[in-house]
Image (cartoon, rainbow, N blue to C red):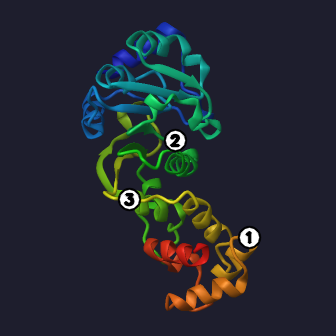
Amino acid sequence: MMNKQEVLSILEQYGLSATKSLGQNFLCNPDVIGRILELAEISDSTRVLEIGPGIGALSEEAVSRAGKYVAVEIDRSFFERLSAIIDSCGGRVIYSDYLQFAPSDLDPSEVPDVIISNLPYYVMTPIILKVLADFPECRKMVYMVEEEAEARIFAKPGTKQYGPLAVLTELFGVKKKEFIVDRNSFVPPPNTTSAVITITRREGLSWKNGWSRFVESAFALRRKTLVNSLSAAGISDKVKVAGALREMGRQETARAEELGPDEFVRLYEILTK
């Protein structure tokens, strides 16, 4: 597993460097790599999707352990390096921005049950929300995120950080902050510490395709009431939203930040039944 000297050697060998605009920082701590792979619980029956492999700190080991391995990478400058460690082991790389990636680009045998990623801060929220919509049957997700940003994942109702990310990840599964990763575990070192988190799918989960749009619409006009937000998004008319809130024991003036995840499910069910 890669250490700092190996990362620097790979960058020199392939003429690579971190692109700041893509939030690239290359993991170079073998202990952290090992712990992430252990959390991912990869075996020869596991189908792995890695988002943003970079130079392959996790990929090199993950592809050798997994039954199926696919990576989605936005930066084509890593082509030669990733081909050497992934294609040769039976995995494959799709060169695309994950936010433009279509799940139909995968063969049925490649649909992941484990997803791993070191997520840049600026795309953390849209990528996680897209993963939930794309792969609701996924068994486990292991993400590295900036420690400050992970507060948005674990936020509670009534707080400024609370939003679609907190609601939808809570509906999907059990969330856990596993451990902290210091900035010296990367080349180049980022400005902040990072955290590794896991999201494990709830047993018996019946994910509804409409949840994501519904919750995001509820928060789209954050200062407005749910009556106004949901009607403006075309989810339902004001009279029906107001009636649904009353049925739930909520005031018609309720805002999205006041509702817990289970209440969003209840509201969705009332308005779509």
- How many neighbours does mark 3 have within 10 angstroms: few (below 14), some (14-19), or many (20 or more)? few
Q: Nearer the viewer, residue 88 or 176?
A: 88
Residue 245 as seen in the image, left or right of residue 169: right
Tell which of 35 and 107 is nearer to you.
107
> For the residues marked 2 and 1, what is the alpha-carbon distance in whole angstroms?
32 Å
Q: Earlier in the sequence, mark 3 or mark 1?
A: 3
- Front: mark 2 or 1: 1
Q: Quick check: 217 above or below 101?
A: below
Q: Which residue is mark 1?
A: 234
Q: Can residue 225 be seen?
A: no
Depth check: 192 or 226 in front?
Answer: 226
x and y percent of residue 165 in the render? 51, 59
- Numbered label tally: 3
Question: Can the viewer see residue 102?
Answer: yes
Q: Disc 3, disc 1: CB below 8 Å? A: no
126 displayed left or right of 69: right
Dot 2: element: loop
Rendered residue at 41%/39% (across/down): 115
Type of amino acid under label 2: Pro
- Amino acid at the residue labelled 1: Gly
- What residue sits right under mark 2 in the picture? 120
Residue 22, compared with residue 139, is above or below; it is above
Residue for badge 3? 205
Q: Is 49 drawn above or below residue 5 in the view shown?
A: below
**Which quadrant does the C terminus fall into?**
bottom right
